Amino acid sequence: MDFRRCMPLLVILAVCSSAQEWPMFQHDPAHTGSVDSASNLDLSDIEVLWVYRTDDRLYYSPVAGDLNGDGRLEVVFTTLEGMVYALDIGGELVWSYDLGKPLVSSPAIGNLSGGRFVAFVSRDGEVILLDGNGRVLQVYDTGLELYSTSVAVGDVNDDGAMDIVFNSVVLDSNGGLMDYDIESLAGRGYAGDYTAVADADADGVYETYWGQPPKMPVVADLDGDGSLEVVKAVDDKKRQTTDILVFNWSQELMESVEAEGISSPPVAADLDGDGKKEIVFCDDAGWLNIINVNDWDVDTQKVMDSKCIYIIPADLNGDGTIELLMASSEGQIYALGSLRDSDGDGLPDYTEDVIGTDKLSQDTDGDGLDDMRDEEPKTPREIEVVEDRPAGNGVELFTAVVALLAAAIIVVAGPIAVKWARRARGSMSRRGGLRGAVKRFGRKVDIGESDGSFFDGRRGSKVDVEREWTEVTDSDFVDIEDGFARKLTDLVASGSILTEDAAARLKTSKIKLAKYAMMLEKEGYVRIDSSRGGNNPLLRPTIKLRRGRT
């Protein structure tokens, strides 16, 4: 049977993915659920780097691979509604593809003769290949009806070309059906459907370990002794809980760790670079769980308010430190990682990789203004050079003195005038005046509903930074840069973000961003969370802001 649809023939090469990638379900064609590259992540310093939200439902694992050869990974995931999304390392959409019908698999990333491809499967049995830019390369129609599967890519028959594996179906690079079943695939080191295969006892024969999400097995050398361990999530019906069981190569139980509410397949990676792999999973309450195999203690951290269904480790920015990607059942992808700041300029290293500044220099463009305060940190400021001129006569000197006096009067009297104007306008609003609708944050509201607070300055802020944070004039917000307020609300609406990261993303100064954040907090759209301490508070979206975006 030939499953080909008439499209140009492609040469699909054997996979050669980087260890930093997570290119398919459970990492590799054997579904080991383990990555071998070491990292230097500080487990006590894991923070949310960004959040991407969709209105679709997520059910399958995201993957991460370098689609365009720039050394940075794209995050690719599918939804039940038939959408495929690709995000960059900053959580921004690179491209999306709408299949127009339900998808039933996680994607897989493989190699073509001309670059990378993304493969996935539809419910009616079509295998679709997209190129690195989200354009259709090939469609194979198997005629099968599928419900839930995983896609793997690899050279099953050792002919130098990549094959596509799902369930017990194997397609060659031309879309032809190859004669394999679950057992014969396992004998070649390929896992069919939701199994994992490995030669744990080193006898030359692959063993098959059966599972089903979230109870997928993991096969990895956890303690660095050269022998493989097998990790399984097993329900304890008597205690009505789930345990993570760890077996050695001879199937002897080494350890049992309670994993209440586990809702993702566990994965293994050496996150902190100590030579031993941590076991990582997430649960139905949105908590990140990391098991340290040195003492089998479990470190936990609340990340999301919804059920987490998958977590994968990958080095997104290629700096040798692993990030974690968590997928929510409600359509969100969370990226977690380190906020390490190597050059001490207030911008985390990861943020500097996103925006393209030098994470080892506080002043990337060398213009004397550090990156945090520089609205264009990669473009040097133009400094006007004033040529020396002979001193003028008495009339010119008198004119200059008068001009300086006038400027001084404006500087002194200007803020007083603005202050009285603001008071007067707030008073009018409280008396019912100025109730016409104005555009604010991209929607129309009645000034009267704010009780004049829209024009009030804020003093005594809980944010302990420069004085400029604590007073905002009308021109800062309403008359000049209402567009900036909309950009900031759009950014915060996509997920909580640190002030410094928000300033970097919007390419503005921290002071300017803080002014707007305080005004948005006054209006009920943003909550400034200073519980972390320091001068880098977290900006959180409020219910009012979220409702305004739905």
Image (spheres, grey):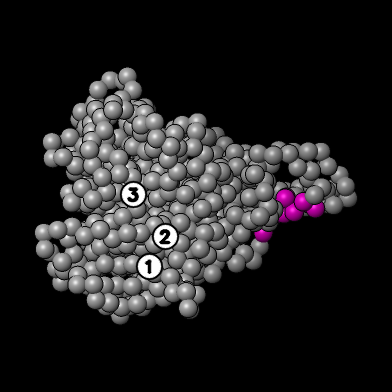
| Residue 344, quarter of picture | bottom left
User: Residue at point 25% right, 30% down?
Assistant: 176
Image coordinates for residue 71, horizontal then vertical, percent: 25, 43
The residue carrying pointer 3 sits among few (fewer than 14), some (14 to 19) or many (20 or more) residues within 10 Å by Cα, namely many
- In this rendered view, identify the residue nearer to me: 188 or 71: 188
Q: Which residue is mark 1?
A: 233
User: Residue at point 42% right, 60% down?
Assistant: 214
Label annotation for residue 214: 2
Whether residue 137 is visible: no
Element carrying mark 1? strand
Taking the magenta stretch, the answer to whether it contains residue 456 is: yes
Q: Which residue is mark 3?
A: 193
Considering only order in the chain, which callout, 2 or 3, is on the residue closer to the N terminus?
A: 3
Assess whether mark 2 and mark 1 are in contact (beta carbons under 8 angstroms): yes
Element carrying mark 2? loop
Left or right side of 105 for 443: right
Image coordinates for residue 99, horizontal then vertical, percent: 46, 31
Q: CA distance from mark 1 to mark 2?
A: 8 Å
Taking the magenta stretch, the answer to whether it contains residue 103 is: no
Image coordinates for residue 29, horizontal then vertical, percent: 25, 49
Q: Amino acid at mark 3?
A: Asp
Q: Amino acid at mark 2?
A: Pro
